[in-house]
Image: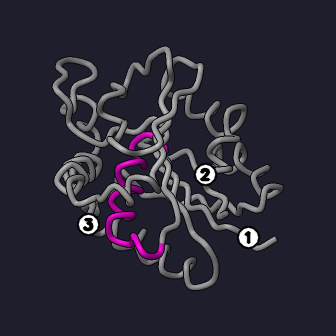
Amino acid sequence: MNSNNVIIIPGLGDDTNKLRIITNWWNKHGITPHIVSIGWHDQENFQQKLAKLVKTIDILSSQETVSLIGTSAGASAALNAFVKRRKKVYHVVNVCGRLRLGKYTGFRSFENRTSSSPAFKESVLLFESMESKLSKADRSRIMTVTPRFGDELVPRDTAILEYAHNITIPTIEHGFSIAMALTIFAKPIIKFLTPE
């Protein structure tokens, strides 16, 4: 079985070790996870970060199939990279990640949630400006995963896409839902990322 490369992008916590541990078993399904840190809190702007991510896609796709998973803040980065490399990326999955501003105030507002990372703010704004350029065919290659019983950080309507495969898992809470999506409830994601 040929290996299917999947780039997994962490959120603001940048917990690469945890993602590596919980997706290690995906190798049994022909998927090779590559955990790629964006470095949300360093001094680089998002365009610099996106250029590095795109370069990683170019390197991996020259050998085998490559797909993307963005968890939390990593979702907008994954979708922005997909827009730039639609011909090289097989599928992309958003796990509990904000893709647009939304009309929320207080704790769940865009300003509040992006206040610690200017790069994350840039990433969401960039994807929202590019979303209309995605065709129905493009959207059919995107999956979004959200918790059925609520996410205290990411409102569902800011995380799903029209005409994408928008699925819910029977969980509650942001971090727990990401962990469950990549472990207990990973079967639909693995199937989606496996070329037919």
The reply, left or right, for residue 188 in relation to residue 11 is: right
| Magenta region, main secondary structure | helix
Q: Is residue 193 magenta?
A: no
Residue type at numbered disc 1: Ser
Give the residue at mark 2. 192
Q: Secondary structure at mark 2?
A: helix
Task: Please provide the residue range marked out in magenta.
Answer: 71-88
Q: Secondary structure at mark 3?
A: helix
Q: Which badge, 2 or 1, comes first in the chain's sequence?
A: 1
Residue type at numbered disc 3: Gln
Q: Which of pointers 3 and 1 indicates the residue nearer the eye? A: 1
Q: Position of residue 54 (x, y in %)?
A: 40, 73
Give the residue at mark 3. 47
Determine the residue positioned at 34% across, 55% down.
136
Of residue 142 and residue 17, the one placed in the foreground of this image is: 142
Determine the residue positioned at 49% across, 73% down.
57
Give the residue at mark 1. 3
Determine the residue positioned at 23% across, 28% down.
112
Q: Position of residue 83 (x, y in %)?
A: 32, 64
Distance from disc 3 to disc 2, alpha carbons, whole Å, reads: 28 Å
